[in-house]
Image (cartoon, helix red, strand yellow):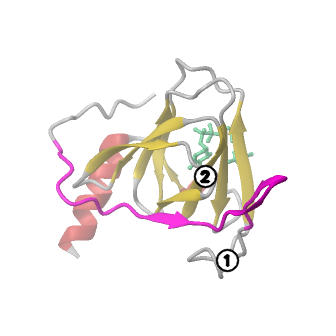
Amino acid sequence: MNSSSDSSKQCVASPFRWYGFNKLGDFRGALTSIESEIDTPFPIKRVYYLYYTLPQIRRGFHAHKTLQQILVCITGQCKVLLDDGNVREDIQLSEPNLGLYVDTMVWHEMYDFSPDCVLLVLASDHYQESDYIRNYADFMSAVKGMKQE
Ligand code: T46
């Protein structure tokens, strides 16, 4: 597991974005629909979800080279650490109609899962292990390389 425990980066103005989805409710309960490219900034090619994650578990520990994603906590709650190499922010997810956008080249870790948490992920591409940067030092080198281009 790669460590990314550098807490020296502070959140000044957050570069991280939320997507608000509709909440169509009536006396029977609520319903949220998410339509590819209408409600999302990318065509959705894959949907997956994390669940039954133990509260003490921290997962993720990677950035994606090209993949964009939106994380929606549809049940329960969890936290997400986002780090774009400049700004590092811990964000709570608990609203089933609020999606956290995770852009390319953003290091992310998910933690503090409630026992009932279901974290839905909308992804811009199919699964490719080659798209992952799983080492934090490699991630920072890539970010620095992008700045020099
Ligand atoms: C991410 C965060 C939010 C697949 O075979 N297909 C898939 O679509 C995915 C997402 C995973 N897998 C396999 C790869 C591993 O053998 O499922 C296993 C668990 O995946 P991983 O250890 O990468 O899980 P997390 O929770 O660390 O990260 C996942 C996503 O992989 C990642 O893209 O951004 O959730």
SS at mark 2 in the image: strand
Query: On screen, 6 above or below 148?
Result: above
Q: Is residue 22 above or below residue 88?
A: below
Q: Residue at x 65, y 81 (%)?
A: 37
Q: Residue at x 55, y 58 (%)?
A: 99
Horizontally, residue 87 falls left or right of residue 27, namely left
For badge 2, the amino acid type reads: Val
Instruction: Out of 12 and 43, give the one closest to the viewer.
Output: 12
Q: Residue furthest top?
A: 56
Report whether the residue tagged 1 is closer than 8 Å to ligand 1: no
The span shown in magenta is: 9-33
Per the image, the residue denoted by label 1 is 43
Residue placed most toward the observer, 46 or 14: 14
Residue 48 point in image, percent of width and height? 73, 50
Residue 67 visible in the current orientation: no
- In the image shown, does 79 or 31 lie closer to the viewer? 31
Residue placed farthest to the front in the image? 27
Quadrant of picture, ligand 1:
top right
Query: Which residue is depicted at the point 61% across and 52% down?
Result: 72
Q: Are marks 1 and 2 in contact (CB under 8 Å)?
A: no
Which residue is label 2 attached to?
Answer: 72
Instruction: Determine the residue located farthest toward the right in the rendered image.
Output: 28
Mainly helix, strand or loop, the magenta region?
A: loop
